[in-house]
Image: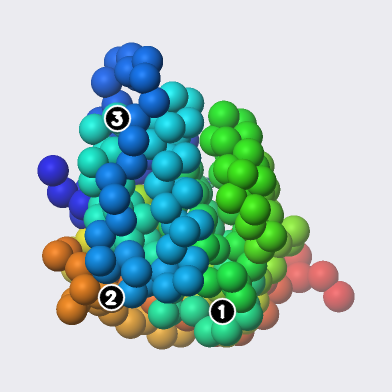
Amino acid sequence: MTLPADSPDAESTAESPAESSAASSAPEAPLVAPAAPPAATTVFGDRLVVAEQFASVLADTGVSHGLIGPREVPILWERHILNCAIAEDSFPHGVAVVDVGSGAGLPGLALAIARPDLHLHLVEPMLRRTTWLSDTIAELGLDNCTVHRGRAEEFDGVLQVPWATARAVARVDKLARWTFPLLEDGGTLVALKGSSAQDELDAATPVLRRLGMSGAVVRTHGVDLLEVPTTTLELTVGSRSGLRSRPAKGSRARR
Ligand SMILES: C[S@@+](CC[C@H](N)C(=O)[O-])C[C@H]1O[C@@H](n2cnc3c(N)ncnc32)[C@H](O)[C@@H]1O
């Protein structure tokens, strides 16, 4: 099985890559999360205990509430928690980050645990998932997360932050349509992608430029730490004032 970031990006409110391997019925007994691998100590430092609690919640109510499949439990750390948290070095100190299509808090909660200086806005349309996210945030005692129920498009003009992130939500052109309006001018989207990130970027560059992208970087994270490093696409937006004020085709310019 490939890493979620390598899997085809999901469209709409499909099940997450984490839950896609769910058997038709969850097992009755709560599953137990595997022990944290040594890389987790490096990534989480003194927050490891909270990360271990997150792993336990994912293995327990994450499975019983259908957010992740039981077959994901043995690989929770490598495929999900570390795959996401390793990208924490993308974000400067103390900034607000919107995680679009957070699902089971991936990457949002993994980042919030690794980086208590960040504030994570978790945007997720499905009630079952937002309820679980809120309960999990309370259980872990995190004070740097806000859950927003709705589709990213509904937060255009409502949420405006300098950083965005997403994993396995949509192809990069669609993801940019959804996330760029939530970014301040000069803001950056950090999209967790698979090894085909560069090809995806090359194919979408003309569209991304039209949407306001001013720069793009493909980065790998955790090369010396993880068996499969995480690849991100960092897309920065320039000033969109021209794009925002452009009148719709056929409409008159307002004075
Ligand atoms: C395949 S899951 C990925 C979940 C998580 N990011 C992960 O990597 O495990 C895609 C998630 O995106 C959400 N989603 C779909 N369309 C969305 C939209 N327009 N705005 C925000 N979230 C959306 C879905 O409800 C779902 O939770």
User: Is 197 or 83 nearer to us in this picture?
Assistant: 83
**Front disc: 2 or 3:** 3
How many other residues sit within 10 Å of disc 3, few (<14), some (14-19) or many (≥20)? many
User: Is 201 or 25 nearer to us in this picture?
Assistant: 25
Q: Is residue 231 above or below residue 11?
A: below
Q: Look at 52% across and 63% down and name the residue there.
A: 113
**Residue on which disc 3 sits:** 70
User: Is 185 or 42 nearer to us in this picture?
Assistant: 42
How many other residues sit within 10 Å of disc 2, few (<14), some (14-19) or many (≥20)? many
Q: Is mark 3 within 8 Å of ligand 1?
A: no
Secondary element under disc 3, as helix, strand or loop, is: helix
Judge whether residue 175 can be spotted in this image. Answer: no
Q: Amino acid at mark 2?
A: His
Q: Amino acid at mark 3?
A: Pro
Q: Are marks 2 and 1 in contact (CB under 8 Å)?
A: no
**Residue on which disc 1 sits:** 187
User: Is 25 or 212 nearer to us in this picture?
Assistant: 25
Q: Is mark 1 within 8 Å of ligand 1?
A: no
Secondary element under disc 1, as helix, strand or loop, is: strand
* Mark linked to residue 135: none
Q: Position of residue 104 (x, y in %)?
A: 47, 43
Judge whether residue 31 can be spotted in this image. Answer: yes
* Mark linked to residue 221: 2
**Dot 2 or dot 3, earlier in sequence:** 3
Give the CA separation, mark 2 to mark 1.
20 Å
Give the CA separation, mark 2 to mark 3.
27 Å
Secondary element under disc 2, as helix, strand or loop, is: strand
**Front disc: 2 or 1:** 2
* Left or right position of 47 against 59: right
